[in-house]
Image (spheres, rainbow, N blue to C red):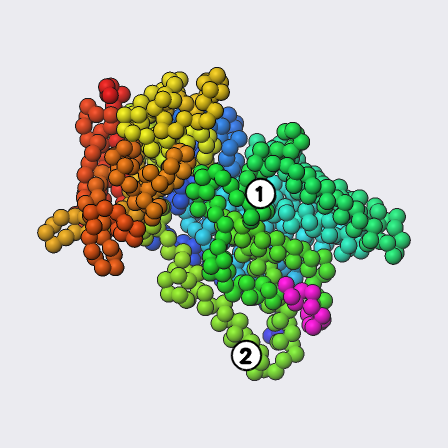
Amino acid sequence: MGSNAKLFSVGDFDFRLQHLLIIGILAIAVTTSALIRAQPAMYGFELHEFDPYFNYRATEFLVNNGYDAYLEWHDDKSWHPFGRDVSATSQVALHLITASMYNVFGGGSSLYDFTIIFPLAMISITSVFIFALVRVIGGTTAGLIASLMFAIALPITARGLIGWYKSEPLGLCLGIIGLYLFLSAIKTNKGKVSFIKMIFAGIFLSLGLSSWGGSQFFLLPLSIFFIALPFFTKDNRFLLWAIPIFSASLLLTTLSFERPGTHFVVGYGTFLVLLPTAVMILMIIIQKFSSVTTRNRNPLLVLGIFAALIIGVFASADVTEGYLFSGVVDLPSVRYFNALNPFMTSDDPLIASVSEHQATTLNEFFRSLSVFIIFGLIGGWLLFSNRIKNSNSLIPNHMKVFALIFGLLAIYISSAFARLELFGAIGLIILSALGLTILLQHVLVKQKILIKIVFCVIIIGLMITPMMLPERGNWVTKAQIVPTILNGASFYQIATGDWLDATNWLKQNTPEDSVIFSWWDYGYYIQTLGERTTLADNATIFTWQIEKIARSFMSPVDDAWAIIHSDSETNVAENYVVVPSNYETLIEQNSAEITGLDADYITIFLAGERIVLDNGIILYNLSGGGDESKVIWFARIAGVDAKKFIEPDSITLTPYALNNSLIGQLIPFTPVTYIDPRTNDQFETYQPGLLPLYLKDIKLQDPDGPFNLVYASPSFSDDFSGRMIAVLIYQVNHDYVG
């Protein structure tokens, strides 16, 4: 039976053996993707990371109350006492699509369980859509290779794990569908079919934007592609209506959502969509009235003028202000500009403190993408090489251009912004799949059997190696990550119920109207699982509120009590460890910057190791990624001299900090010795290179004092050697007299 033998027919469609093979390979890709990314479930079936807890709560609200109520929802459990306009500040499409799919496919399961499975399903099925996308560019073989690569890609895995109910899985899926429809419409070049595809391409990319802000980077290669198209297509009349339809569909659909909504259309949507569309139309018109010899030269001159104007506008603008032309045109945040300019740095310590906002190191880039880099470079070279003409000619020129634009831009962006490393993966996957296809076509058709065998062995070996080596750091074992609710996002690969127990204690043992003071990392846990109101959370909406919390942590206990205890109308500027430089102006404006926080409880999280000595004494090493490891950022965000509070190792608290700051008193440990880990020599005071060891010492446990320890999670009381995480809850004594 031939490889293209007909098996059966459905209407006018003949189902052939090759279709069965395609389905089989896609099934392998989807299954492999799901199996790799489901590994965190071995530790516990929970949501993973912090943001998913808000997304779950928002989706739950939508399911229970309907879309109209969701649009009007002002969440009073967030950012006390101001609250949060949910539809204006969150990923509406993520919540809406999930709620809709739950109503259809939920099948009696709990919404919590559904949201755990949802990202795994989305990222796995995207293996099929990446096949469709790359198939349009370079054919079926390239599409299948891309699908298999997508299934194992480490950056995709890192942001598509089970429980990762965040923006990326759905946003990535919708964005790739949109790209596929767009390129398919370009390639089809048929009136009605292309018209429909362009409309839906705009809709899907708009839904992607509303699901994940990072989806806007799908528009960067498209905007450049718009401008390149007139030079690589013969029928430019098609472009005159097709691209404007796509742009209109994208922008009009975006306007239906509050976020990104008008902010996008009036802002960077203008530069990413409208201006490239207008420039493309202008260049086509110029081409029409140009001679054969000047057909390309004249549009290039126009393009050069346009590029110079854009560069001049942005070069003369202060992007940190967030707008151009006196507020007429909105711009994305500084962190997005950082993705375009890797050399741009932010002076904001809050942005710098978030790991996913850091630039990607070369080591991390090569570790995450390894063989994809090799195959991608080969693919980029072969696309425009004349050495393999027969294979190379199978890919249309404009598709080659898109692949190269997307690949190079994606690699560039991912090198500047760790969170966008998955774009680098997708770009390299596209180039790799095209390159391997060209090589396969050349080798399998023209080379001897021995060369064919050797070639296939090398390719398979290169693909398998990062999935097997190193033993504990390969692409498969890297997915064996403990859900953050089970280890508090500490440095330790342990799973405990401390956070689950702590949030349940809050729900069961505190008044419903209680306000919880904590670092912003834990806001979503407390709101969703503890059902209590917080001062700050992972949305980082009001940065000055986070600064107030940081200043409170760094203030002496009595001053911190005055800040935390007082309401948001009381001026407590004299109690802050740092008063803002614009103090007088803030007083005139009655700004919340210098007022109280009105909290009832304080929650802190610690991580470290227990060391049980032969005499039964337990010593502790505190450097496990809890609040004890974040004090350096508390200090920087508070604007205080970090050297006064933190030793040169950037982790160990100074004696001054332990005795004269709220965070030092909240940490129930006191250093008893400093040890040299190389020699085990002990010292009474800190010296560079020494490791502090602590004894348990609860300093704030007086019911009549400003703060009283009322809860410690189970691991805090364990008496065996090993790694420890602990959640501590202190009650604020509103009747304290300092």
Mark 1 neighbour density, 10 Å: few (under 14) some (14–19) many (20 or more): some
Amino acid type assigned to the residue bearing label 2 in the image:
Ile
Which label was assigned to residue 453?
2
Question: Residue 213, percent across and down?
Answer: 55, 41
Amino acid type assigned to the residue bearing label 1 in the image:
Phe
Disc on the earlier residue, 2 or 1: 1
Q: Secondary structure beneath disc 2?
A: helix
Q: Residue 388 magenta-drawn?
A: yes
Is 296 on the left-hand or right-hand side of 693? right
Residue at 84% x, 53% y is 295
Residue at 20% x, 56% y is 681
Boundaries of the magenta span: 380-391
For the residues marked 2 and 1, what is the alpha-carbon distance in whole angstroms? Answer: 47 Å
Question: Residue 435, percent across and down?
Answer: 62, 66
Q: Residue furthest left?
A: 615
How many numbered discs, if any?
Answer: 2
Question: Residue 158, percent across and down?
Answer: 45, 52
The image quarter in which residue 39 lies:
bottom left
Which label was assigned to residue 337?
1
The image quarter in which residue 406 lies:
bottom right
Is 221 on the left-hand or right-hand side of 416? right
